[in-house]
Structure formats: structure tokens, C-alpha cells
Image (spheres, rainbow, N blue to C red):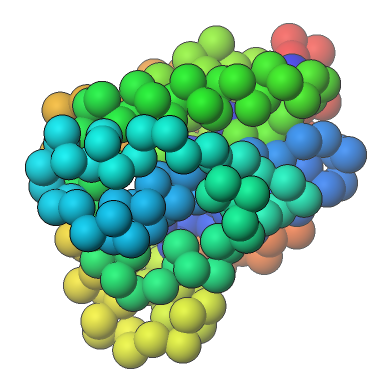
Amino acid sequence: MIVAIDGPGGSGKSTVSRNLAHRLGWNHLDTGAYYRAATLAVLRDGADPVDEQAVIKAVAGHRFDQDRGQMLLDNEDVSAAIRSSDVTAVVSAVSSHPELRKLLVREQRKWVGGRGGDTVVEGRDIGTVVFPDADLKVWLEASAAERARRRAQETGSDLLAVEADLARRDRADSDRTISPQQPAFDAIHLDTTGLTVEAVVDRILALLSKPLL
């Protein structure tokens, strides 16, 4: 069984997905980390993030993997490096390239297929593109103020700067022509504003307990 957890930055999908997978004893895949790792590879190569051919050339040949919550690039743990401000500033540009998205979607599907068993997969296009036949699709959302507060608390960044960055990322991810950030037509919407992680996880577990699933 696959549970797809999608939503914009700061909606709580990463924390919720990890906790949900832990409580279920399932595999967990963070697809957003793949795009950040690819962006890190582009920056290390000195390639232009807006040049699709340069991006593909910089990324080709690298090995992407996740193991016990760590993002691996050629077996190097880059979990911290991919959260840098430099990566954050250009990850939307890198992620917008159709050929890169096709490459990484293949890698993500291969990861799930290779692990076997039940998996919680989080991202921004899981229910629409990566696993459109997921058994349960959940779209997490929260108010702009709540999303910014969470992200600022998580990163220690200035609140106003975080609000501006989230708005920029939302526009970029929603406006791209390939795999835009949007809920699947059959996704269940959960507003996480004011809810604890445990409360959100409990609601998803309740959805999983329904007979039709």
C-alpha cells in the first residue's frame, strides 16, 4: 500500500509523513530531498540552474538514495547540505526542468519498488504524478502565517524572509508546466493549522482504517 502525502512548504508534510510511517512501521520516502540533492549536484558542478541541458549534464551519473532518513548523493550523506540557503534559493528553478523531473521520478519509483512493502511517500506531486494510483492521497495545507511560523522556527530564519520565500516557492511550483504543485482530484484535504503532529497523524490513521482502503 502507498500513502501519498502532498502539500506546500510548511504544511507539515515532512514531520507528519515521518511520524505516520514510524507509527505504522512502514517505509518512508521524502521526494523533495531528491530535488534538493540534484540542486546540490548542480551547484557543486557550477552549472546554471536555469539551463536544462546543463542541469541534466550535472546530475547525470550521480546516484540518489535514502537510507534511515538520510539523503545520500553517491553514498554521501547530504541531509544537512541540501537544507542550505544556497540550495533553497534555486531548488525551484532546478526542479522546474521536465527532463530532470522525469529522471528523479524514475529514481523515486525504483526506490519504492526496491524496498517492497507499504510506504508513505511525501512531496508536492505524489498523488498526481509519482504515484497517481496511491491507495490514499492526502493534501496537507495550513494558513500562510502558520506555515511561515513553522518554517522560521525550524530554520531559525527571519519570519518575514520566510514568508516571502514560501510565497515565491508556491508561485514557482504552482506555475510550472510540468507536474505543478496541486492536489490530486481524489485527495483528502487536511488543514493542519493549529493542529499538533499527533492529531494530524491520528486523522490519517483513521482514514486508513476505513473499509474501502
Which residue does the image show at 58% across and 62% down from the upper left? 79
The answer to whether residue 176 is above or below residue 9 is above
The answer to whether residue 13 is above or below residue 209 is below
Q: Position of residue 57 (x, y in %)?
A: 26, 36
Task: Answer whether residue 124 is visible to the viewer in this image.
Answer: yes
Q: Quadrant of residue 110?
A: top right
Q: Nearer the viewer, residue 98 or 143?
A: 98
The answer to whether residue 31 is above or below residue 13 is above
Which residue does the image show at 43% across and 81% down from the upper left? 152
Q: Position of residue 68 (x, y in %)?
A: 77, 50
Which residue does the image show at 25% across and 66% down from the upper left? 89
Quarter occupied by the C terminus? top right
Q: Is residue 92 left or right of residue 108?
A: left
Q: Nearer the viewer, residue 141 or 158?
A: 158
Q: Is residue 52 left or right of residue 198?
A: left
Q: Nearer the viewer, residue 148 or 51?
A: 51
Q: Position of residue 173 (x, y in %)?
A: 24, 44
Task: Answer whether residue 122 is visible to the viewer in this image.
Answer: no
Q: Nearer the viewer, residue 24 or 113?
A: 113
Q: Is residue 185 left or right of residue 108?
A: left
Q: Position of residue 188 (x, y in %)?
A: 52, 30
Quarter occupied by the N terminus? top right
